[in-house]
Image (cartoon, helix red, strand yellow):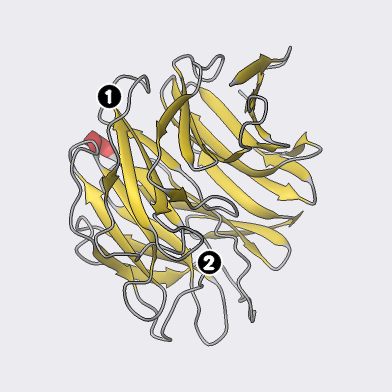
Amino acid sequence: MILALALLPLLTLAPEKDGAPMRQPQMAMEGAKAVIAYGAGNDVFAAVSTDAGVSFAKPVKVGNAGFISLGRHRGPRVAISGGAIVIAAIAGKLGKGQDGELFAWRSTDNGKSWSKATQISDAPGAAREGLHALAAGPNGMFFATWLDLRKKGMRLMATVSKDAGATWSPNFPVYESPDGHICECCHPSAAIAADGAIHVMFRNWLGGSRDMWLATSRDNGKSFTAKKVGEGTWVLNACPMDGGGLAVKPNGDVVTSWRREQKIFWTEGSSFQAPNWAGKDSALALDSNGKPVIAWTEGMRVMFYDGAVRELATHGGFASVAASSAGVLAAWESGTGITVQRLR
């Protein structure tokens, strides 16, 4: 891997000569620890920073579990809790949607070494759509959810770990649409509140409308209640392949960002925000003051909001953002590589 540090706090990860393109970066932060995970070919990689993104260690190969689902929001997810970094990705022996299981890896030495892959979806081929989310909660809690096809009709299933990713629960349902299926290829998002409440945002399908919904569990996943996010509706006879972002404030308010038609919207608690932002593929985090930081793509440009809108890059896509008390980071696809920028 080639790492280039510009005068600004901007890091470029580029493949070696003839190496596979780096795709679908995802970031997580806990204090000054920051992790970027991504896929290249059928391998999962991670790079770790212990100084809030000022510098990163050389990327390490996390693992390979077969043909990885990679592209259009399919790819690794990463979270940090309880002294462990956990990365989850969907892969299969055949790939290309013919099969797919959700696997997890964990590291307890700041990403220097990784466990073998553990399969955490428990029905053969159920995760073959390749779209999932991973969230970290207090005291080593991790939660993974994915679009599931173990039965007819797309639904959301999940699993939880209470021991920093060492073991995972049997799978359990999050949501099944009364109309037979949820949106078939929009990735879910997940977040866990300080009190352990689990929140999952997904694109539903009800009567032809593909609106964002929020499912919440306050009993460790035993049951979920679901409600529509925002105002208005989007009737669409196709899947936009765009799931948005989700975070929880210290007071428990849920903050979301998502796409409807060609616009980016966001909610904060009961407040519905409808800024005039053209774009798609939004990602969201909360800064140390509980304020949203949002990245998205407008045409070929990577855009960013943290109270004001600005351009991060003239060319890029599939941005990820992460924030903690130590700073704010963004990463995005750039050519065959990945750009990481420290924004605060």
CB under 8 Å between callouts 1 and 2? no
Quarter of the view holding residue 147:
bottom left
Left or right: 310, with 115 as reference point: right
Residue at disc 2, secondary structure? loop
Mark 2: which amino acid? Cys
- Identify the residue at image location x=27%, y=68%: 173
Residue 190 appears in the picture as rendered: no
Sequence order check, earlier mark of 1 and 2: 1
Q: Position of residue 158 (x, y in %)?
A: 30, 59
Quadrant placement of the N terminus? top right
Above or below, 321 relative to 173: above
The residue under label 2 is 185
The residue under label 1 is 108
How crowded pointer 2 is (Cα within 10 Å; few <14, some 14-19, many 20+) is rated as many
How crowded pointer 1 is (Cα within 10 Å; few <14, some 14-19, many 20+) is rated as some
Residue at disc 1, secondary structure? loop
Quarter of the view holding residue 50:
top left
